[in-house]
Amino acid sequence: MLPPTIKMKASVCIITHNHEPWIADAIDSALMQAADFDFEIVIGEDASTDGTLAICQQYQRNHPDRIKIIARQKNVGCVENVKATLAECAGHYIAILAGDDFWNDQTKLQDQVSFLESNNDFSASVTQANIEYHGHLDKRFESNYARKNEVWDGADVINTPSFAAASSIVFRKADLLPLPRWFESVAYGDSSIRGILAKRGKFHYLQRKATTYRCNNWGLLYQLRKKGSTYMADAAETIKHHILQPA
C-alpha cells in the first residue's frame, strides 16, 4: 500500500459476494482507470463460497500497492458489507463498483472526480450505463439508467426510482460518512446512499455510458424482487421515509 504520509485522492470501493465469473472484470476495469491522482481499490469480500476471494487475492499479489481486501470471516450481508468497506476507504472521493458490474470507460474516475473538484455545490456524480442481461446488451431499461439531463436537484434524485446504476456513483467521503444508524436496517443500500447524498447537494449525470450494469438473476436486487412487489414497495418507502427525516 502507499505510505500513510501520501494523501489518497480516491478509493474504488468494490462490493462482492459469490461473483467468481465476473469479479475479474470489475477489478480490471478499476485498474485500467487513467487518472492523474493516487487511488486505491478496496474490496469488501463477504465470505464467498466460490472462488471470488482467491481471484481477489491473486490481484492483490499482483498489485500490492493498489489493492486492499477486507475479507469477512462470515457472511454479513450486502448492506453491512457496504457500510464496513466504506469505512476502510482512505480516499477523499469514493467510487462504488459492484463485483458483478464493470466500468467500460478508462477516464470515468478522472472525469467524475474532476467535476466534483470544480463544483462544490454538487454532492455526487453518476454516469449513464449499459444494461447487460445474461451476456447481451438489453435496451428495455435503458431509459432508467441513461438519463438525458446532466444536472439534477436533490429532490428529483430522491423522487426518481432507478435513478442511476449503483456502480456509476462517485462522491466525497465526508458527504456520506458517518452513515446514519437507520442504514443498517434497510433492505438495500444504493438508493439510501443516493438519498443521503441528494440532501447534501445536486447530482451530476455524466452523459456517456461509462458503466455496465449486469442485471441478471443472481444479484441482491433479484433476490429481493422474489419477495414480491409489495415487499419492494414497502422497502423503498421505508428508505424514503428515513431520507426525508430532518438531520
Image (spheres, rainbow, N blue to C red):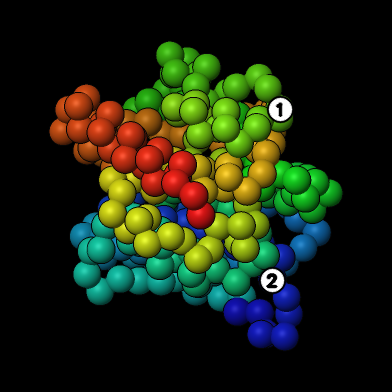
Crowd around label 1: few <14 · some 14–19 · many ≥20 (10 Å): some
- Give the percent coordinates (x, y) of residue 56: 42, 64
- Give the percent coordinates (x, y) of residue 195: 50, 42
Label 1 with label 2: CB-CB less than 8 Å: no
Establish if 164 lies above or below 33: above
- Give the percent coordinates (x, y) of residue 212: 51, 34
Which quarter of the figure has residue 211?
top right
Which quarter of the figure has residue 40?
bottom right
Establish if 221 lies above or below 132: below
Residue ranking furthest to the front: 246
Q: In screen coordinates, is 2 left or right of 136?
A: right
Please name whichever residue, 193 or 97, is drawn nearer the observer in this view of the structure: 193
In the picture, the disc for residue 150 is 1
In the picture, the disc for residue 40 is none
Of the residues shown, which amino acid type is indicated by label 1? Glu
Please name whichever residue, 242 or 208, is drawn nearer the observer in this view of the structure: 242
Tell me the distance, in whole angstroms, between the alpha carbons under discs 1 and 2: 28 Å
Establish if 36 lies above or below 158: below
Of the residues shown, which amino acid type is indicated by label 2? Met
Of the two numbered discs 1 and 2 on the same chain, state the one appearing first in sequence: 2
Q: Secondary structure at mark 2?
A: loop
Q: Secondary structure at mark 1?
A: loop
- Taking the spot 25% from the left edge, 33% from the top edge, the residue there is 234
In the picture, the disc for residue 8 is 2
Please name whichever residue, 3 or 189, is drawn nearer the observer in this view of the structure: 189
Which quarter of the figure has residue 228?
top left
Establish if 139 lies above or below 91: above
- Give the percent coordinates (x, y) of residue 127: 62, 34
- Taking the spot 60% from the left edge, 71% from the top edge, the residue there is 90
Residue ranking furthest to the left: 227
